[in-house]
Image: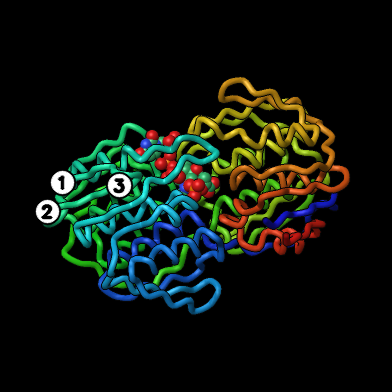
Amino acid sequence: MDKLVITKSPPLSGSVTISGAKNAALPLLISSLLADSTCSFQNVPALRDISTTLLLLKDFGASINQVDKNHVEIDASSLNSVTASYDLVRTMRASILVLGPLLAKHGKANVSLPGGCAIGARPVNLHLAGLEKMGAKIEVDEGYIRAEVDGRLKGARIFMDIVSVGATENLMMAATLADGDTILENAAREPEIVDLANCLNSMGAKVSGAGTDSVKITGVKNLQGCDYSVLPDRIETGTFLVAAAVSGGSVRCENAEPSTLDAVISKLEQAGAKITIGEDWIELDMQGKLPKAVNLKTAPHPGFPTDMQAQFMTLNAVAQGSGVITETIFENRFMHVPELQRMGAEIELEGNSALSKGNSKLKGAQVMATDLRASASLVIAGLVAEGDTIVNRIYHLDRGYEAIEHKLGGLGANIKRVKE
Ligand SMILES: CC(=O)N[C@H]1[C@@H](OP(=O)(O)OP(=O)(O)OC[C@H]2O[C@@H](n3ccc(=O)[nH]c3=O)[C@H](O)[C@@H]2O)O[C@H](CO)[C@@H](O)[C@@H]1O
Ligand SMILES: C=C(OP(=O)(O)O)C(=O)O
Protein backbone atom coordinates (compact mmCIF):
# COMPACT_ATOMS: atom_id res chain seq x y z
CA MET A 1 0.00 0.00 0.00
CA ASP A 2 1.29 3.51 -0.84
CA LYS A 3 2.75 5.79 1.84
CA LEU A 4 3.33 9.52 2.03
CA VAL A 5 6.63 10.83 3.31
CA ILE A 6 6.44 14.40 4.54
CA THR A 7 9.50 16.33 5.61
CA LYS A 8 9.33 19.54 7.67
CA SER A 9 8.35 22.21 5.17
CA PRO A 10 8.50 25.99 4.83
CA PRO A 11 5.25 27.96 5.40
CA LEU A 12 2.86 27.04 2.57
CA SER A 13 2.57 29.69 -0.08
CA GLY A 14 0.80 30.07 -3.42
CA SER A 15 -2.51 29.01 -4.87
CA VAL A 16 -4.27 25.67 -5.20
CA THR A 17 -7.25 24.65 -7.31
CA ILE A 18 -10.03 22.99 -5.38
CA SER A 19 -11.69 19.89 -6.86
CA GLY A 20 -15.36 19.00 -6.99
CA ALA A 21 -16.77 17.74 -3.70
CA LYS A 22 -16.59 14.01 -3.05
CA ASN A 23 -19.68 14.16 -0.89
CA ALA A 24 -21.66 15.99 -3.57
CA ALA A 25 -20.34 13.93 -6.50
CA LEU A 26 -21.23 10.55 -4.97
CA PRO A 27 -25.02 11.13 -4.69
CA LEU A 28 -25.01 13.06 -7.98
CA LEU A 29 -23.49 10.16 -9.93
CA ILE A 30 -25.88 7.78 -8.19
CA SER A 31 -28.87 9.99 -9.09
CA SER A 32 -28.25 9.04 -12.74
CA LEU A 33 -30.00 5.76 -11.82
CA LEU A 34 -33.26 7.73 -11.84
CA ALA A 35 -32.91 9.17 -15.36
CA ASP A 36 -34.21 7.84 -18.67
CA SER A 37 -31.29 9.29 -20.65
CA THR A 38 -27.61 10.24 -20.32
CA CYS A 39 -26.40 12.36 -17.39
CA SER A 40 -23.24 14.37 -17.94
CA PHE A 41 -21.25 15.45 -14.87
CA GLN A 42 -18.34 17.90 -14.88
CA ASN A 43 -15.94 18.91 -12.07
CA VAL A 44 -16.06 15.30 -10.81
CA PRO A 45 -13.03 14.75 -8.54
CA ALA A 46 -10.63 11.97 -9.59
CA LEU A 47 -10.88 9.88 -6.43
CA ARG A 48 -11.03 6.26 -5.42
CA ASP A 49 -14.63 6.66 -4.12
CA ILE A 50 -15.65 7.98 -7.53
CA SER A 51 -14.10 4.97 -9.33
CA THR A 52 -15.88 2.69 -6.86
CA THR A 53 -19.21 4.41 -7.61
CA LEU A 54 -18.65 4.10 -11.35
CA LEU A 55 -17.83 0.38 -10.91
CA LEU A 56 -21.02 -0.03 -8.92
CA LEU A 57 -23.11 1.66 -11.64
CA LYS A 58 -21.36 -0.41 -14.31
CA ASP A 59 -22.13 -3.55 -12.33
CA PHE A 60 -25.84 -2.67 -12.56
CA GLY A 61 -25.43 -2.44 -16.36
CA ALA A 62 -25.12 1.35 -16.78
CA SER A 63 -22.86 2.57 -19.59
CA ILE A 64 -20.11 4.90 -18.48
CA ASN A 65 -18.15 7.24 -20.71
CA GLN A 66 -15.19 8.86 -18.94
CA VAL A 67 -14.84 11.90 -21.23
CA ASP A 68 -11.80 13.19 -19.36
CA LYS A 69 -10.36 12.98 -15.84
CA ASN A 70 -13.12 15.15 -14.35
CA HIS A 71 -15.99 14.66 -16.81
CA VAL A 72 -18.13 11.57 -16.94
CA GLU A 73 -21.30 10.61 -18.80
CA ILE A 74 -23.59 7.94 -17.41
CA ASP A 75 -26.49 6.25 -19.15
CA ALA A 76 -28.36 4.14 -16.61
CA SER A 77 -31.64 4.06 -18.53
CA SER A 78 -31.60 0.27 -18.74
CA LEU A 79 -30.05 -1.98 -16.12
CA ASN A 80 -29.54 -5.72 -15.92
CA SER A 81 -29.03 -5.99 -12.15
CA VAL A 82 -30.26 -4.27 -8.99
CA THR A 83 -27.76 -5.91 -6.65
CA ALA A 84 -24.94 -3.94 -5.00
CA SER A 85 -22.46 -6.57 -3.88
CA TYR A 86 -20.52 -6.62 -0.63
CA ASP A 87 -17.19 -6.41 -2.49
CA LEU A 88 -17.99 -2.88 -3.69
CA VAL A 89 -20.15 -1.64 -0.82
CA ARG A 90 -17.65 -2.57 1.87
CA THR A 91 -15.10 -0.06 0.55
CA MET A 92 -17.54 2.84 0.42
CA ARG A 93 -20.45 3.46 2.74
CA ALA A 94 -22.09 5.93 0.37
CA SER A 95 -23.09 2.91 -1.79
CA ILE A 96 -26.19 2.70 0.41
CA LEU A 97 -27.46 5.69 -1.60
CA VAL A 98 -28.32 3.39 -4.53
CA LEU A 99 -31.15 1.88 -2.46
CA GLY A 100 -33.68 4.74 -2.86
CA PRO A 101 -33.13 5.33 -6.61
CA LEU A 102 -33.19 1.61 -7.52
CA LEU A 103 -36.37 1.06 -5.55
CA ALA A 104 -38.04 4.15 -7.02
CA LYS A 105 -37.18 3.34 -10.63
CA HIS A 106 -37.07 -0.48 -10.69
CA GLY A 107 -39.23 -1.44 -7.71
CA LYS A 108 -36.49 -3.64 -6.29
CA ALA A 109 -32.99 -3.43 -4.79
CA ASN A 110 -30.54 -5.70 -2.99
CA VAL A 111 -27.80 -3.74 -1.30
CA SER A 112 -25.16 -5.21 0.94
CA LEU A 113 -25.20 -3.66 4.41
CA PRO A 114 -22.22 -1.35 4.62
CA GLY A 115 -19.73 -2.46 7.24
CA GLY A 116 -18.91 -0.41 10.31
CA CYS A 117 -15.98 1.93 9.85
CA ALA A 118 -13.33 3.55 11.92
CA ILE A 119 -15.41 6.60 12.90
CA GLY A 120 -18.45 4.89 14.42
CA ALA A 121 -21.25 2.36 13.94
CA ARG A 122 -23.07 4.40 11.28
CA PRO A 123 -26.42 2.59 11.17
CA VAL A 124 -28.84 2.98 8.23
CA ASN A 125 -32.12 2.66 10.17
CA LEU A 126 -33.38 6.09 9.05
CA HIS A 127 -32.88 5.21 5.36
CA LEU A 128 -34.85 1.98 5.82
CA ALA A 129 -37.63 3.42 7.99
CA GLY A 130 -38.21 6.25 5.50
CA LEU A 131 -38.44 3.89 2.53
CA GLU A 132 -40.81 1.62 4.50
CA LYS A 133 -43.01 4.64 5.18
CA MET A 134 -43.13 5.13 1.41
CA GLY A 135 -44.47 1.60 0.99
CA ALA A 136 -41.32 -0.50 0.54
CA LYS A 137 -41.08 -3.97 2.06
CA ILE A 138 -37.61 -4.41 3.45
CA GLU A 139 -35.85 -7.35 5.00
CA VAL A 140 -32.24 -7.91 5.95
CA ASP A 141 -30.98 -11.31 4.94
CA GLU A 142 -27.43 -12.70 4.83
CA GLY A 143 -25.96 -9.22 5.17
CA TYR A 144 -28.08 -7.79 2.35
CA ILE A 145 -30.91 -5.26 2.49
CA ARG A 146 -33.59 -6.73 0.24
CA ALA A 147 -36.18 -4.11 -0.67
CA GLU A 148 -39.24 -4.30 -2.89
CA VAL A 149 -42.27 -2.21 -3.68
CA ASP A 150 -45.51 -3.15 -5.36
CA GLY A 151 -45.94 -0.53 -8.08
CA ARG A 152 -44.59 2.94 -7.26
CA LEU A 153 -43.35 4.24 -3.94
CA LYS A 154 -45.94 6.47 -2.25
CA GLY A 155 -45.23 10.00 -1.07
CA ALA A 156 -45.17 10.32 2.74
CA ARG A 157 -44.36 12.72 5.56
CA ILE A 158 -41.14 11.44 7.07
CA PHE A 159 -39.68 12.77 10.31
CA MET A 160 -36.08 11.79 11.02
CA ASP A 161 -35.15 11.94 14.71
CA ILE A 162 -31.43 12.41 13.89
CA VAL A 163 -30.16 14.78 11.23
CA SER A 164 -28.68 12.50 8.57
CA VAL A 165 -27.07 13.64 5.32
CA GLY A 166 -27.25 10.20 3.71
CA ALA A 167 -30.85 9.45 4.74
CA THR A 168 -31.99 12.87 3.47
CA GLU A 169 -30.27 12.22 0.12
CA ASN A 170 -31.55 8.64 -0.23
CA LEU A 171 -35.15 9.57 0.56
CA MET A 172 -35.02 12.72 -1.57
CA MET A 173 -33.93 10.67 -4.59
CA ALA A 174 -36.53 7.96 -3.92
CA ALA A 175 -39.30 10.55 -3.58
CA THR A 176 -38.64 12.16 -6.97
CA LEU A 177 -40.31 9.19 -8.73
CA ALA A 178 -42.88 8.41 -6.01
CA ASP A 179 -46.60 8.86 -6.33
CA GLY A 180 -47.58 12.15 -4.61
CA ASP A 181 -45.83 14.48 -2.19
CA THR A 182 -43.08 13.60 0.26
CA ILE A 183 -42.07 15.92 3.09
CA LEU A 184 -38.76 15.25 4.81
CA GLU A 185 -38.77 16.80 8.28
CA ASN A 186 -35.60 17.47 10.31
CA ALA A 187 -33.75 17.07 7.03
CA ALA A 188 -29.99 17.70 6.82
CA ARG A 189 -29.11 21.15 5.41
CA GLU A 190 -25.61 20.47 4.02
CA PRO A 191 -24.62 22.26 0.78
CA GLU A 192 -24.23 18.83 -0.87
CA ILE A 193 -27.97 18.28 -0.35
CA VAL A 194 -28.75 21.55 -2.10
CA ASP A 195 -26.44 20.48 -4.95
CA LEU A 196 -28.29 17.17 -5.27
CA ALA A 197 -31.69 18.93 -5.26
CA ASN A 198 -30.52 21.35 -7.96
CA CYS A 199 -29.30 18.46 -10.10
CA LEU A 200 -32.53 16.48 -9.60
CA ASN A 201 -34.55 19.56 -10.56
CA SER A 202 -32.44 19.94 -13.70
CA MET A 203 -33.52 16.36 -14.53
CA GLY A 204 -37.19 17.37 -14.19
CA ALA A 205 -37.78 16.62 -10.49
CA LYS A 206 -39.83 18.87 -8.21
CA VAL A 207 -37.79 19.41 -5.06
CA SER A 208 -38.17 22.52 -2.91
CA GLY A 209 -36.82 23.57 0.48
CA ALA A 210 -33.40 21.87 0.13
CA GLY A 211 -31.00 23.65 2.48
CA THR A 212 -33.76 24.01 5.10
CA ASP A 213 -34.89 21.34 7.57
CA SER A 214 -38.11 20.67 5.64
CA VAL A 215 -37.77 19.42 2.08
CA LYS A 216 -40.79 18.86 -0.16
CA ILE A 217 -40.64 16.55 -3.15
CA THR A 218 -43.55 16.15 -5.53
CA GLY A 219 -43.14 12.89 -7.40
CA VAL A 220 -43.04 12.89 -11.21
CA LYS A 221 -43.47 9.99 -13.66
CA ASN A 222 -39.96 10.13 -15.10
CA LEU A 223 -36.70 12.06 -15.10
CA GLN A 224 -34.43 12.98 -18.00
CA GLY A 225 -30.65 13.21 -18.23
CA CYS A 226 -28.77 16.34 -17.16
CA ASP A 227 -25.61 18.34 -17.69
CA TYR A 228 -24.33 19.27 -14.25
CA SER A 229 -21.14 20.57 -12.64
CA VAL A 230 -20.29 19.34 -9.12
CA LEU A 231 -20.07 21.83 -6.24
CA PRO A 232 -16.49 22.64 -5.10
CA ASP A 233 -15.27 20.61 -2.12
CA ARG A 234 -15.64 22.62 1.10
CA ILE A 235 -13.77 20.02 3.15
CA GLU A 236 -10.80 19.96 0.76
CA THR A 237 -10.83 23.77 0.82
CA GLY A 238 -10.92 23.79 4.63
CA THR A 239 -8.11 21.25 4.77
CA PHE A 240 -5.80 23.45 2.66
CA LEU A 241 -6.72 26.53 4.71
CA VAL A 242 -5.88 24.72 7.96
CA ALA A 243 -2.63 23.39 6.46
CA ALA A 244 -1.71 26.97 5.53
CA ALA A 245 -2.61 28.22 9.03
CA VAL A 246 -0.63 25.50 10.81
CA SER A 247 2.42 26.20 8.65
CA GLY A 248 2.18 29.97 9.24
CA GLY A 249 1.76 30.51 5.51
CA SER A 250 -0.41 32.24 2.96
CA VAL A 251 -2.56 30.26 0.52
CA ARG A 252 -5.28 31.08 -1.98
CA CYS A 253 -7.88 28.39 -2.80
CA GLU A 254 -9.26 28.83 -6.33
CA ASN A 255 -12.50 27.32 -7.68
CA ALA A 256 -13.90 27.28 -4.14
CA GLU A 257 -17.39 28.06 -2.85
CA PRO A 258 -16.81 30.39 0.14
CA SER A 259 -20.50 30.47 1.14
CA THR A 260 -20.28 26.80 2.19
CA LEU A 261 -17.48 27.45 4.69
CA ASP A 262 -18.87 29.96 7.21
CA ALA A 263 -18.23 27.88 10.36
CA VAL A 264 -14.70 26.93 9.28
CA ILE A 265 -13.76 30.48 8.27
CA SER A 266 -15.05 31.84 11.56
CA LYS A 267 -12.83 29.40 13.54
CA LEU A 268 -9.81 30.22 11.37
CA GLU A 269 -10.37 33.93 12.06
CA GLN A 270 -10.56 33.16 15.79
CA ALA A 271 -7.24 31.35 15.34
CA GLY A 272 -5.76 34.63 14.11
CA ALA A 273 -5.82 34.08 10.35
CA LYS A 274 -6.50 36.94 7.97
CA ILE A 275 -9.12 35.67 5.53
CA THR A 276 -10.06 37.38 2.26
CA ILE A 277 -12.96 36.13 0.20
CA GLY A 278 -13.88 36.53 -3.47
CA GLU A 279 -16.71 35.07 -5.48
CA ASP A 280 -14.99 31.73 -6.06
CA TRP A 281 -11.80 31.97 -4.01
CA ILE A 282 -10.64 32.22 -0.41
CA GLU A 283 -7.25 33.42 0.74
CA LEU A 284 -5.73 32.79 4.16
CA ASP A 285 -2.70 34.66 5.44
CA MET A 286 -1.18 33.91 8.86
CA GLN A 287 1.23 36.85 8.43
CA GLY A 288 3.97 34.67 9.91
CA LYS A 289 2.11 34.16 13.21
CA LEU A 290 1.45 30.93 15.06
CA PRO A 291 -2.28 30.14 15.23
CA LYS A 292 -4.19 30.51 18.51
CA ALA A 293 -6.07 27.46 19.81
CA VAL A 294 -9.87 27.45 19.37
CA ASN A 295 -12.79 25.76 21.11
CA LEU A 296 -15.24 24.04 18.82
CA LYS A 297 -18.09 21.55 18.77
CA THR A 298 -19.10 19.65 15.64
CA ALA A 299 -22.73 19.92 14.56
CA PRO A 300 -24.88 19.37 11.47
CA HIS A 301 -24.65 22.17 8.88
CA PRO A 302 -24.52 25.14 9.27
CA GLY A 303 -22.61 24.13 12.42
CA PHE A 304 -18.94 23.15 12.42
CA PRO A 305 -18.46 20.09 10.14
CA THR A 306 -17.28 16.84 11.70
CA ASP A 307 -15.22 16.30 8.51
CA MET A 308 -12.99 19.27 9.58
CA GLN A 309 -12.56 18.17 13.21
CA ALA A 310 -9.36 16.16 12.77
CA GLN A 311 -7.59 18.95 10.85
CA PHE A 312 -8.38 21.43 13.66
CA MET A 313 -7.05 18.88 16.18
CA THR A 314 -3.63 19.32 14.57
CA LEU A 315 -4.06 23.10 14.51
CA ASN A 316 -4.87 23.15 18.23
CA ALA A 317 -1.96 20.86 19.06
CA VAL A 318 0.64 23.25 17.66
CA ALA A 319 -1.24 26.48 18.44
CA GLN A 320 -0.69 28.93 21.27
CA GLY A 321 -2.88 28.17 24.27
CA SER A 322 -5.31 25.39 25.06
CA GLY A 323 -8.49 24.46 23.23
CA VAL A 324 -11.33 21.98 23.54
CA ILE A 325 -12.78 20.10 20.58
CA THR A 326 -16.06 18.24 21.11
CA GLU A 327 -17.28 15.67 18.58
CA THR A 328 -21.07 15.26 18.62
CA ILE A 329 -21.77 13.47 15.31
CA PHE A 330 -19.71 10.27 15.39
CA GLU A 331 -18.94 8.34 18.59
CA ASN A 332 -15.47 7.18 17.58
CA ARG A 333 -13.90 9.95 15.55
CA PHE A 334 -10.75 10.59 17.57
CA MET A 335 -8.57 7.86 16.04
CA HIS A 336 -6.08 10.50 14.91
CA VAL A 337 -5.44 11.59 18.50
CA PRO A 338 -3.21 8.65 19.54
CA GLU A 339 -1.26 9.07 16.29
CA LEU A 340 -0.80 12.81 16.90
CA GLN A 341 0.26 11.97 20.47
CA ARG A 342 2.92 9.66 19.00
CA MET A 343 4.24 12.74 17.20
CA GLY A 344 4.40 14.63 20.51
CA ALA A 345 1.00 16.37 20.59
CA GLU A 346 -0.24 17.02 24.11
CA ILE A 347 -3.92 16.14 23.89
CA GLU A 348 -6.14 14.64 26.59
CA LEU A 349 -9.29 12.76 25.68
CA GLU A 350 -12.29 12.78 27.95
CA GLY A 351 -15.45 11.25 26.56
CA ASN A 352 -16.28 13.04 23.32
CA SER A 353 -13.96 15.98 24.05
CA ALA A 354 -10.28 16.49 23.36
CA LEU A 355 -8.32 19.06 25.32
CA SER A 356 -5.12 20.20 23.69
CA LYS A 357 -2.52 22.02 25.76
CA GLY A 358 -1.04 23.76 22.74
CA ASN A 359 2.52 24.67 21.78
CA SER A 360 3.37 21.03 21.09
CA LYS A 361 6.67 20.63 19.28
CA LEU A 362 5.88 17.79 16.91
CA LYS A 363 8.45 15.22 15.80
CA GLY A 364 8.15 13.11 12.68
CA ALA A 365 7.15 9.47 13.19
CA GLN A 366 5.61 6.52 11.38
CA VAL A 367 1.86 7.00 11.72
CA MET A 368 -1.15 5.06 10.57
CA ALA A 369 -4.03 6.68 8.75
CA THR A 370 -7.26 5.22 10.10
CA ASP A 371 -9.85 7.22 8.20
CA LEU A 372 -9.99 9.91 5.59
CA ARG A 373 -9.86 13.10 7.65
CA ALA A 374 -7.61 11.50 10.29
CA SER A 375 -5.15 10.97 7.45
CA ALA A 376 -5.40 14.63 6.48
CA SER A 377 -4.66 15.71 10.05
CA LEU A 378 -1.49 13.60 10.08
CA VAL A 379 -0.32 15.02 6.75
CA ILE A 380 -0.78 18.56 8.12
CA ALA A 381 1.12 17.61 11.28
CA GLY A 382 3.94 16.26 9.10
CA LEU A 383 4.39 19.69 7.47
CA VAL A 384 5.56 21.23 10.76
CA ALA A 385 7.04 18.23 12.57
CA GLU A 386 10.83 17.99 12.90
CA GLY A 387 12.25 15.38 10.51
CA ASP A 388 10.24 12.90 8.45
CA THR A 389 6.67 11.80 8.98
CA ILE A 390 5.59 8.64 7.21
CA VAL A 391 1.85 8.31 6.78
CA ASN A 392 1.02 4.66 6.14
CA ARG A 393 -2.15 3.22 4.60
CA ILE A 394 -3.04 6.29 2.56
CA TYR A 395 -5.79 4.28 0.91
CA HIS A 396 -8.25 6.42 2.90
CA LEU A 397 -6.68 9.68 1.75
CA ASP A 398 -7.04 8.59 -1.88
CA ARG A 399 -10.76 8.04 -1.26
CA GLY A 400 -11.25 11.75 -0.68
CA TYR A 401 -8.35 14.02 -1.76
CA GLU A 402 -7.46 14.41 -5.43
CA ALA A 403 -3.68 14.45 -5.99
CA ILE A 404 -3.00 15.73 -2.49
CA GLU A 405 0.78 15.34 -2.78
CA HIS A 406 0.86 17.36 -6.02
CA LYS A 407 -1.40 20.07 -4.65
CA LEU A 408 0.57 20.42 -1.39
CA GLY A 409 3.85 20.14 -3.29
CA GLY A 410 2.74 23.09 -5.44
CA LEU A 411 2.43 25.14 -2.25
CA GLY A 412 6.01 24.33 -1.26
CA ALA A 413 5.45 21.28 0.96
CA ASN A 414 8.10 18.57 1.01
CA ILE A 415 5.89 15.58 0.35
CA LYS A 416 6.27 12.48 -1.76
CA ARG A 417 4.33 9.30 -2.42
CA VAL A 418 6.21 6.07 -2.02
CA LYS A 419 4.71 3.14 -3.91
CA GLU A 420 5.00 -0.31 -2.38
C1 LIG B 1 -20.62 10.51 1.58
C2 LIG B 1 -20.98 11.54 2.58
O1 LIG B 1 -21.67 12.50 2.28
N1 LIG B 1 -20.48 11.38 3.80
C3 LIG B 1 -20.75 12.39 4.81
C4 LIG B 1 -22.11 12.09 5.44
O2 LIG B 1 -22.06 10.76 5.94
P1 LIG B 1 -23.41 10.04 6.36
O3 LIG B 1 -24.49 10.46 5.44
O4 LIG B 1 -23.11 8.59 6.47
O5 LIG B 1 -23.65 10.65 7.80
P2 LIG B 1 -25.02 10.97 8.51
O6 LIG B 1 -25.33 12.42 8.38
O7 LIG B 1 -26.04 10.00 8.04
O8 LIG B 1 -24.66 10.66 10.03
C5 LIG B 1 -24.97 11.54 11.08
C6 LIG B 1 -25.30 10.76 12.33
O9 LIG B 1 -26.53 10.07 12.15
C7 LIG B 1 -26.39 8.73 12.50
N2 LIG B 1 -27.33 7.93 11.67
C8 LIG B 1 -27.31 8.08 10.31
C9 LIG B 1 -28.18 7.38 9.52
C10 LIG B 1 -29.09 6.48 10.13
O10 LIG B 1 -29.89 5.81 9.46
N3 LIG B 1 -29.09 6.37 11.48
C11 LIG B 1 -28.24 7.08 12.28
O11 LIG B 1 -28.26 6.95 13.50
C12 LIG B 1 -24.92 8.40 12.22
O12 LIG B 1 -24.49 7.26 12.91
C13 LIG B 1 -24.26 9.69 12.68
O13 LIG B 1 -24.09 9.65 14.08
O14 LIG B 1 -22.36 13.02 6.47
C14 LIG B 1 -21.41 12.97 7.56
C15 LIG B 1 -21.87 13.97 8.61
O15 LIG B 1 -21.76 15.26 8.14
C16 LIG B 1 -20.01 13.25 7.04
O16 LIG B 1 -19.09 13.04 8.07
C17 LIG B 1 -19.67 12.34 5.88
O17 LIG B 1 -18.47 12.78 5.26
C1 LIG C 1 -16.51 10.33 6.60
C2 LIG C 1 -16.34 10.74 5.35
O1 LIG C 1 -16.79 10.10 4.24
P1 LIG C 1 -17.66 8.79 4.10
O2 LIG C 1 -19.05 9.12 4.60
O3 LIG C 1 -17.66 8.55 2.63
O4 LIG C 1 -17.01 7.70 4.91
C3 LIG C 1 -15.63 12.01 5.02
O5 LIG C 1 -15.76 12.47 3.86
O6 LIG C 1 -14.95 12.57 5.90
Q: Is residue 109 visible?
A: yes
Secondary structure beneath dot 3 equals: strand
Q: Which residue: 84% across, 48% down?
A: 388
What is the count of numbered marks? 3
Name of the residue lying farthest toward the front = 142
Disc 1 from disc 2: Cα separation: 8 Å
Residue nearer the viewer, 163 or 250: 163
| Left or right of 97 on screen, residue 102 | left
Pair 3/1: label in front: 3
* Quadrant (top left/top right/bottom left/bottom right) for the C terminus: bottom right
Q: Which residue is mark 2?
A: 150
Q: Pointers 1 and 2 in contact (CB under 8 A)?
A: yes
Residue 37 placed where, x, y %?
A: 29, 75
Q: Which residue is mark 1?
A: 135
N-terminal of the pair, mark 3 or mark 2, is: 3
| Left or right of 219 on screen, residue 170 | right
Pair 3/2: label in front: 3
Quadrant hosting ligand 1: top left
Residue 286 placed where, x, y %?
A: 77, 46
N-terminal of the pair, mark 3 or mark 1, is: 1
Circle 1 residues within 10 Å: few <14, some 14–19, many ≥20: some
Residue type at tag 2: Asp
Residue type at tag 3: Ile
Name of the residue lying farthest toward the left = 151
Residue type at tag 1: Gly
Circle number at residue 145? 3
Q: Which residue: 36% across, 57% down?
A: 84
Disc 3 from disc 1: Cα separation: 15 Å
Circle number at residue 223? none
